[in-house]
Amino acid sequence: MTLEWKKVSKRFGDKQAVDELSLEVPEGELLVLIGPSGCGKTTSLKMINRLVDPQTGSVLVGGRDVSHVPAVELRRHIGYVIQHVGLFPHMRVSENVGAVPKLLGWSKEKIEQRVHELLELVGLPPQDYAQSWPAHLSGGEAQRVGVARALAADPPVLLMDEPFGAVDPLTREILQREFLRIQSTLGKTVVFVTHDLDEAIRLGDRIAVMNEGRLVAAAPPAELLLNADPFIRDFTGEDRALRRLARLSVGQALGDATPMKSASRRDASVGAIRTDATLKEALSQMLEAGETSLEAFSPAGRSMGTLTLEDLLERAAGEVAS
Amino acid sequence: MIIAKQGEFDPVPLAALLPGAISLIAPFALLKENRVVDGIPMSGFQLAGAWNWILIGVFILVFLASFLKKTLWRSVLYGGSGLLCFWAMAWLLVRGSFLLPEGAAPRISPAWGFWGLPIAAYVLIDHSRIFRFRFGGLVLLTLLILPTALLFSGGRGEAISVMREWSARKDRFGAEFVVHLRLFLTAVGGATLLGIPLGVQAARGGRSGASVVSFVDAAQTIPSMALFGLLMAPLAALSQAFPLLRTLGVRGIGAAPALIALTLYALLPIVRNTVVGLEQVPDSALEAGLGMGMSPPQLFWRVQWPMALPYVLTGLKTASVQAVGNTAVAALIGAGGLGMMIFQGLGQSAPDLILLGVIPLVLLAVGVDRIWGFVILRTVSPGLSTVGGDS
C-alpha cells in the first residue's frame, strides 16, 4: 500500500512542526525519517494514523485521504510500534499480541493461531513466552512483542517511532537485523522514525532527512551520503565515506550480486575476506594487515577474486553507481 | 553449625517475650464479686500455678532459638509458641474463673497484663513462616478459634466479664451489631457509587475534577465529632421544613447525619485512589491502545480501568476499614451501632462493657481488611503485581 504526504503543514502554537511536506512512499518501501529532535519527523509519522491531523494538505494511504476514514477504523489496519513499547502490563504476552485481532472480532482459535505464528516470527518461542507477563520481559523481548503486536492483523502499513531507541546497542543491532529479516519476508510499507544515522543507513531503502519541519532530502542511503547539501554533509558527519563503505559488501564491489549480510564475521586469516563482509570491514582488515589487496572468498569457500584498495577508494568516493 | 554467626541474632522474638513475661508478672486478671466492686488482681503466675513452667520453658526456648540459624524448625517453634500464647490467654481466664469468690454474678476481668499474651501471640505468629501457604490463613484461624471455643464451652467461659456483659444484653448486642453493619455498608456503598465516577471525572482533568478532590480533601480535615455537630442543625431545620423528610426518618440526630458524615469520610480514599490509579497508567500504554485503534470506551475498559483497579480496590479497602471505626462514633448522635456499648461503658465506668463494643469492632475491622485483601488478590491481574506473577 502506498503512502503520500501532500503539501502537509502543522503548527503547534508558535512552532511550525511540519512545513509543506510532500513525500511519496511506494508500496513495500522502508522509508526512514530522520533529523534533529523537533524536526517534525514524529509529527509527520503520526499524521498517517491520525494521531495528529494536519492543518493544511492531505495524507493519503493507499490513495485515500485519511481524513475521510474514521480514525479508529484506519488505525486497526496500520501497525504502530513506539519507543516505550507500551505493552499492557495486565495482559499476558499472548493477549497483548492478540489485541488488534480481538478488536477486529476474530474468533478465539484464529487469534490463538495468529499469536503463535507471530511469536515464532519475532523469535520468541510461544511455549515459553505466550503466557508470560510483560513485567518479566527484558527490553529487547518486550520490543519483539511490540513488533508482533503491530503485525498481528497483518496490516499493509507499519509505522515505527524510534522502536529500538530504548534498548542497549547490542540488543538494538540484533533487533535491527531481525527486523530486516522479517521485512524481507513480509514486504510491508514501513515508515521508520529514528535519530540514529547508522540505524537509518542500515535499515532504510530510502532516507528522508527533515529539518525544522521541512524535507531537506530523500534518497537511498548511498546517494544521501554523497549529497553535497551543507546541512546533509553536516548531518551525515565527517566519517560518511566510512558509513557508505559499511553499506556495501565485498561481493557487491566485486560485481556479483551477493546481498550483504551484516551478520557476517570475517575469517581470522589475514589477507582473505568473505564476500558477505562489508567494505568497511575490508578496509579495516587492510589497515590492520598493512596490505593493499585482499583475496575474496564466498561463504562456501570459493575464491571470488581480489579486492584492492583502489576498489575501496572508488566506492567511497561514489564513482561507481551502487 | 546451627548456631547463627555473629550479627545474625533475630531480635523480633524479644518483642514477644517482653509482653509475654509482663503478663506473667503483672496483674493479669481481676477477680470480682460483681460488676461494680474493685477486684482482686491476679498475675499470670498466680493463675497458672505449676503450669506456668510450661510457658516459661517455651519462652526460654524461643529466646534460645533466636540465636539459631533461620530454619523451618525455628519457624515452627515461633508459630507453635504463638499459638500457645493465644490458647494460654483463654485458659488462664477459665482457670481464674474457678477461683472466683461466691456472689450473685462473680466475674473475671482482664487487667492490663492480660494484653501481653495476645501481643506475644501476634508477634510470634506473624514472624513465623509456617502459615504462609495457600489457605494458611484459614488453618491459622481454625487453630486459634476451635481450641478457644472448646475451652469456653460447657459454661466454663461464662464468668469472663465480657461474656457476662454479653449474656446480660444478647438481643441488644445483636441488634446493635446489625445496625453497625448496615450503617457502615450503606456509607461505603454510597461512597463507592459516588466516589469512583468522581475520581474518573477528576482524572480526566478540568477544573470540576480538581474542585471535587479539594472538596473531599477538606471534608476529611474536619474532625468526625465536629462534622456530626455541623450536620445536626441543617438537617434538623430541613426536617422541620419538609414533613416528607421527617417521615423518611431524616432528623438532626440519628441515621441521617451519621450516613452523610460517614459517606463523606469514605469518599476521600476512594476518589483519591481512583485518580491516582488512572493517572499512573503510563502514556505509552495509552498511545499504544489509541494507535492500535481502540475507541475511547475501549481504551478505558480494556487499558485504563484494569490498570487502575489495584489502586481503586485499595482505596475501597481503606475506606471500609476506616468506616468500621468511624461508625462507632456515630453512636454519639443516636445512630446506634457498636459504639453504643463503648459509650455506655464509658458512662457507667464499666470497662467490661467497653470491651464488649471494642472486641467485635476490632474483629470486624480485621475481617473487612482480610476480605478486601482476598478480593484484590482475586480480581487484580497477576501481571500488575511483582509477586506471584508466574504461570
Image (cartoon, rainbow, N blue to C red):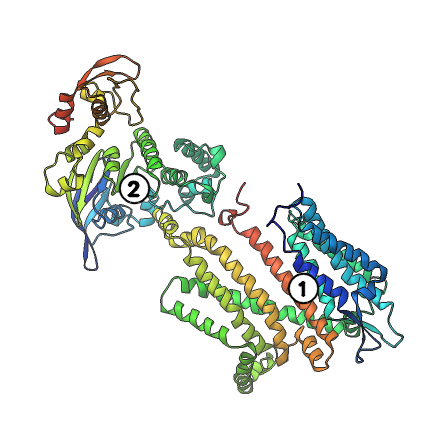
Above/below status of B263 relative to A8: below
Residue B182's disc is: none
Label 2 Cα crowd, 10 Å radius (few <14 / some 14-19 / many 20+):
many
Identify which residue, A39 or B159, lies in the foreground: B159
Chain ID, mark 1: B
**In this figure, which residue is indicated by the disc labeled 1?**
B363
Question: Please, which residue is most extreme toward the top here?
Answer: A302
Q: Which residue is drawn at 56% across and 54% down?
A: B376
* Element class at badge 1: helix
Percent position of residue B163, x then y:
78, 69
Above/below status of A125 relative to B184: above
Spatial CA distance of label 1 from label 2 is 57 Å
**Could one spot residue A157 in this view of the protein?**
yes
Figure quadrant of residue B199: bottom left
Task: Answer with left or right where residue A281 lies relative to residue B316.
Answer: left
Screen quadrant of the C terminus of chain A: top left
Percent position of residue B287, x then y:
35, 50
The amino acid beneath tag 1 is Leu
Identify which residue, B371 or B68, lies in the foreground: B68
Task: Answer with left or right where residue B358 lies relative to residue A291.
Answer: right
Question: Please, which residue is most extreme toward the right here?
Answer: B102
The amino acid beneath tag 2 is Leu
Above/below status of A226 relative to B370: above
Percent position of residue A295, x then y:
22, 15
Screen quadrant of the N terminus of chain A: top left
Percent position of residue B327, x then y:
61, 72
Are the residues flagged by discs 1 and 2 from a single subunit? Answer: no
Identify which residue, B92 or B247, lies in the foreground: B92
**In this figure, which residue is indicated by the disc labeled 2?**
A159
Figure quadrant of residue A194: top left
